Image: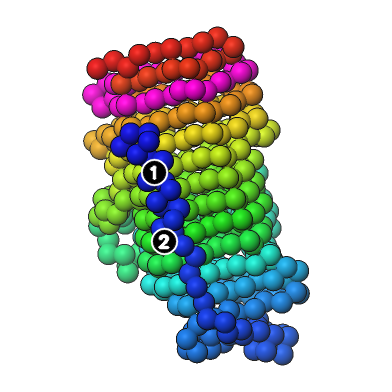
Amino acid sequence: MNEAEAWRYADEIRDRVRPPEFPDRWFDLTDFSSGEEWTRAFQAAIKECHEAGGGHVRVPAGTYPTGAIHLLSNVDLHVEAGARILFSTDPADYLPAVFTRFSAIECYNYSPFIYAHGQENIAVTGGGVLDGAAGPEHWWPWVGTPEFGWRPGMPHEAEDWAELQRMAAEGVPVEERAFGAGHYLRPNMIQPYLCRNVLIEGVRIVRSPMWEIHPVRCENVLVRNVSIHSRGPNNDGCDPESCRSVVISGCVFDVGDDCIAIKAGRGPDGRRVGVACEDVLIEDCDMRYRYGSVAIGTDTTGGIRNVFVRRCRWGGPGLYFGLYIKTNSVRGGFVENVFVKDVEISELTKEAVSIDLYHGDGHTGDESPVVRNINVTGIRSDRTRSAYLLRGYPEQPLREITIRDSSFNRVERADVANDIKGFAVSAVTVGGSPVELEPDV
């Protein structure tokens, strides 16, 4: 795929990924409760809307304390401006456990706060707030670090996470990977799983336990004009995983981890499932904090292809990387056909373009990932640590990496480019000096 073909294909994705349509039926949440118990009201309103053939569940202005919300086909959960869905801090309100993924490994765990499994034509829309109520007192201490409220003697996730990884490595059936009650693996905020035609639009998301928007094995996903402000541990903004046909547009990310992280399963479990993430378009988004602006990985095991990023703004104090492709020979898989253009960078503490096969476990496994056909053009960067850091393996180099028509104004150290075949740099300035590199063969 060359550059011209790539952007034509990106336009095809944009045109293909259309929002689901819903019948003009409205079900007011307040008609399903006396004002004291909202979890049952959400369940009842969604069920009635679904059984009527679909429509909209209106959440009017006000605050609605609730446990898990499970969406059904043909239902739009419409959270009006002035409405706040305030999720419970009691883990019991997210039971029974559901089929999910924790950090890219399949298991049964606490329900995501808004969850759907095997549904079609679903949405969360409106100008209201989804408030996970997480913080140093609730959910975040489970990560096990003092920065987020953990203190010696408090429970945390380390043992459960190690056990889940052991189960995956040993091929324990997913139905036996049972966590939830008595365990400490944090749920995600929004997770449609094996769904088609998904829309997340307009809402503001705050204080999530972990990843914010996490579609898994979904097709035709549109996330647009969403604002996410949650600086907790592992608080990725939007993580499409093993999905096909995803558009993320007009969003603001101020989060505690990667703004967007594209994933495809992890290690043995990712190889067992074997589903790639492909055809992802990201456009007109602001990435403000904290790790990768657009990250690909580290969970690359099932493979990632056809990712397009354009007209975005990256940067701010505390934001680390721009384009951040990160994996290693434990995760394996592949990353191919990644195209980035017309990005404005105000400030990054690390690289504008980082492709690193030594991330995390480094080169300690037998599954060397393939990374090829990465094209970056039209970057305008004011301040970064360096323009690029590119590290392949001697026996598995990065392939066909192009950076052109870009300027990286204030840089602190020299660029790194090791073990690459076909690295080309043209019409680029770094620190005011021109850089030109012809591709080797």
Instruction: Give the position of the N terminus as an image quadrant.
Output: top left
Task: Give the percent coordinates (x, y) of residue 164.
Answer: 38, 56
Magenta stretch, residue numbers: 394-421
Q: Is residue 414 left or right of residue 217?
A: right
Q: Do we see residue 6 in this rendering? A: yes
**Relative depth, front residue between 243 and 166:** 243
**Of helix, strand and loop, which one carries label 1?**
helix
Instruction: Give the position of the C terminus as an image quadrant.
Output: top left
**Of helix, strand and loop, which one carries label 2?**
strand
Task: Give the percent coordinates (x, y) of residue 327.
Answer: 38, 37
Secondary structure mostly seen in the magenta stretch: strand
Figure check: 247 above or below 325: below
Comparing labels 1 and 2, the label whose residue is closer to the camera: 1
In percent of the image, x 37 and y 46: which residue is there? 9
Residue 398 lies within the magenta run: yes
Label 1 amino acid? Arg
Task: Give the percent coordinates (x, y) of residue 399.
Answer: 30, 27
Q: Earlier in the sequence, mark 1 or mark 2?
A: 1
In percent of the image, x 58 and y 45: which residue is there? 284
Q: Which residue is mark 2?
A: 220
Q: Which residue is mark 1?
A: 8
Q: Quadrant of residue 163?
A: bottom left
Residue 305 lies within the magenta run: no
